[in-house]
Image: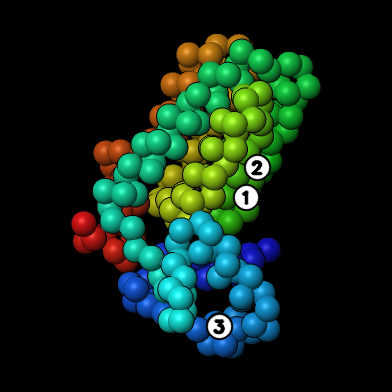
Amino acid sequence: MTTIREQIEQAILLGDFGTDTRLDEQQLATRFAVSRTPVREALKQLVASGLLEHKPNRGVFIRTPSVQELLEMFEVMAELESFCGRLAARRVNEQDMETLQQLSDACEIALASGDHDRYYHANEKLHLALYELSGNRYLAKQADTLHKRLQPYRRLQLRVPYRMRQSMSEHRKIVEAICAGDSEAAADAMRAHVAIQGEKFNDLIADLPFSNAV
């Protein structure tokens, strides 16, 4: 089930609100047919993620990252996840392999359903598990923090035609490499999976309402 946070997040990224728009709690509550309490909590979460900005005595506004900032964040995310993959491949045990396969199977089922939201949530669980399997709590925390910051854009990327299918293909390579204990292959597969470059980056930017930001 899509949360209020996710509905607001999606509305922002799909351009339902203008850039630098002030978001009003009551208007959002009316729009999504909920009370102001879950809207208020959703806005707090989105401020924490960096998608929104709280301006004292003025309210909550949409924060528009530049294309360059977005690219830089994805570059760092790719390297963090690559490191997680490398360490996970070195430290994986039989139980870890079983967990990874179960999470990967959940992604396969979500892909077959054609439901973008379902696939996104299954995909998120797999990535968070990979951070933990690195065995490095500091690294896992840093990866998780940036993952949350990029959630809206990773979610939107899955709506690019054929991206879910491509994403699943990349997942299979990651899980296979980790379970084989091949740290370099796992690192390379994770980096390629997250890196937003070339056509993947152009497709993502084309779908964003601020694609002309600099």
Which quarter of the picture shows residue 78?
top left
Q: Which of marks 2 and 3 is in front?
A: 3
Residue 25 coordinates in the image, percent (x, y): 55, 83
Q: Distance between the residues labelled 2 and 3?
A: 30 Å
Instruction: Decide: is 160 above or below 91.
Output: below
Q: Is mark 2 on a helix, strand or loop?
A: helix
Q: Give the amino acid at mark 3.
A: Glu
**Contact (Cβ within 8 Å) of mark 1 with mark 2:** yes
Q: Residue at x 55, y 11 (%)?
A: 182
Horizontal relation, residue 166 to residue 203: left or right: right
Q: Residue at x 64, y 30 (%)?
A: 137
Q: Give the amino acid at mark 2.
A: Lys
The residue identified by callout 2 is: 125
Q: What element carries label 1?
A: helix
Which quarter of the picture shows residue 171?
top right
Residue 100 coordinates in the image, percent (x, y): 68, 29
The residue identified by callout 1 is: 121
Residue 3 coordinates in the image, percent (x, y): 64, 66
**Contact (Cβ within 8 Å) of mark 3 with mark 1:** no
Q: Which of marks 2 and 3 is nearer the N terminus?
A: 3
Q: Residue at x 50, y 31 (%)?
A: 81
Instruction: Decide: is 7 above or below 127.
Output: below
Q: Can residue 121 be seen in this view?
A: yes
Question: Crowdedness of circle 1 by 10 Å Cα count: few (<14), some, many (20+)?
Answer: some
Residue 72 coordinates in the image, percent (x, y): 33, 42
Q: Distance between the residues labelled 3 and 1?
A: 26 Å
